[in-house]
Amino acid sequence: MSWTALVVLSAGAYAFKLTGVVAGERFADRLAPVTALLPAALFSALVVTMAVADGPFLVVDARLIGVAAGALAVARRAPMAVAIMVAMAVTALVRLVA
């Protein structure tokens, strides 16, 4: 990452924080539904990034298949612990076979 990108991203983050401080409570009612969804969206983005990234490259391997199996378990309304176990087991099985 270049210094220019780092400075631009830092300035953007500071601008967002400053906007929040200046705007105060004026936008709180309008943004409340969106802010309730942010933690789930950030967690999902983190999981997907960890599943398909290997350094600067995108890789489709056992991790992605395990995440897909875990997502399918969640879609079938399995408890979170079961979904995690399914994802781990499928990932291990694919690595064993491959």
Image: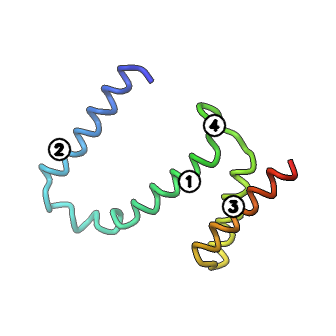
Q: Classify residue 24 as left or right of residue 1.
A: left
Q: Are marks 3 and 2 in contact (CB under 8 Å)?
A: no
Q: Mark 1 — residue?
A: 47
Amino acid bearing label 3 = Met
Of badges 2 and 4, the one in the foreground is 4
Query: Which residue, given by chain and number where applicable, does mark 3 sit on?
Result: 88
Q: Position of residue 77 (x, y in %)?
A: 62, 79
Give coordinates of residue 24: x percent, y percent. Answer: 13, 57
Q: Earlier in the sequence, mark 1 or mark 2?
A: 2
Residue 59: x and y, percent?
A: 70, 40
Q: Residues within 10 Å of mark 2 (few under 14, many from 20)?
A: few
Which quarter of the figure has residue 54?
top right
Mark 2 sits on what residue? 18
Please tell me whether mark 4 sits on a helix, a strand or a loop. Answer: strand
Question: As displayed, is residue 11 above or below residue 77?
Answer: above
Q: In the image, which is nearer the foreground, mark 3 or mark 2? A: 3
- Residue at screen point 41% across, 20% down: 2
Q: Nearer the viewer, mark 3 or mark 4?
A: 3
Amino acid at circle 2: Leu
* C-alpha span from label 1 to label 3: 13 Å
Q: CA distance from mark 2 to mark 4?
A: 35 Å
